[in-house]
Amino acid sequence: MNKPSFFIVGQHAVIEALKNPKRKVLKVFLTEESKKNIHRINPKKNLLADVKVFFKTKKELDKYSTKENLLHQSYVAEIEHLDKPILKEFIKNKNNITFVCLDGVTDPRNIGSLIRSAASFNIDGIIVKERSFPEESKLMYKAASGAMEYINVFKVSNINSTLKNLKDKNFWVYGFDGKGEKNFTKVEWKGNNILLFGSEGSGMHQHTSKYADFLVKIDINEKIESLNISNSAAIVFHHLNYLKK
């Protein structure tokens, strides 16, 4: 049974989808030059061998990205969704897991940038609310720059109950808040941890924040109110990845 399909645009998003053996790529729409570039970048394997390729002009490709005001870079693909990873299966017999949980974060560009950082710094997975996750957003895939193929996205129906269940399985929940009790770099970061981030506008929902075992912060110049969530996340991910080395 075929899964629903959707379109993505951008060089990195399309090429990484083609390289992912778990991703079904139905069609790609390319210029002659972008096809040549795919072969130049990946000379050892023909990524287009089992894919329907349609050649278009740049102007013809514009229709796939004009609505979102995105640059397609002469790469467009129609793809299917990946199989959904199951959270309870993933955590079986694993230790020292680090998850990110997004509470009320819905902006596709921010989510895509955060996913790119999470994959770059070896975060184990991202927990999102299924109903509000923009899973077919061209903007999110473009901002993730191919990293969507390398991160586990756990889509859940209820964030609060998911946090409660994970806490019962020996996970610590750290909520990131400008009014947090201590700098996140002062935490030992041992065991299984969840990094809980709220939306830029209103932060964590009050009820969700009650599931945080600790509230921590990133120390920044006191004259600056806050950081963009994707920037904040990248700082945290890099620090935790460094500690593992």
Image (tube, rainbow, N blue to C red):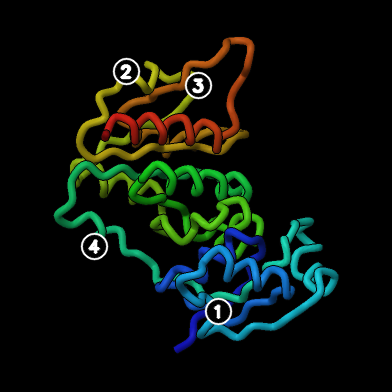
The residue under label 3 is 178
Q: Categorize mark 4 by other alpha carbons within 10 Å: few (<14), some (14-19), many (20+).
A: few
**Badge 3 amino acid:** Gly
**Badge 2 amino acid:** Lys
Q: How many marks?
A: 4
Seen at 66% across and 64% down, the residue is 9
Seen at 59% across and 34% down, the residue is 200
Closer mark to the observer between disc 3 and disc 2: 2
The residue under label 2 is 186
For the residues marked 1 and 3, what is the alpha-carbon distance in whole angstroms? 47 Å
Check contact, mark 4 vs mark 1: CB within 8 A.
Answer: no
Residue 76 seen: no
Residue 89: mark: 4
Using the rendered view, name the quadrant where residue 199 is placed.
Answer: top right
Q: Residue 39 at what x, y percent from top left?
A: 57, 71
SS for tag 3?
Answer: loop
SS for tag 4?
Answer: helix
Q: Residue furthest top?
A: 222
Seen at 59% across and 44% down, the residue is 110
Q: Residue furthest left?
A: 93
Closer mark to the observer between disc 1 and disc 2: 1
Q: Residue 52 at what x, y percent from top left?
A: 60, 86
SS for tag 1?
Answer: loop
The residue under label 1 is 48
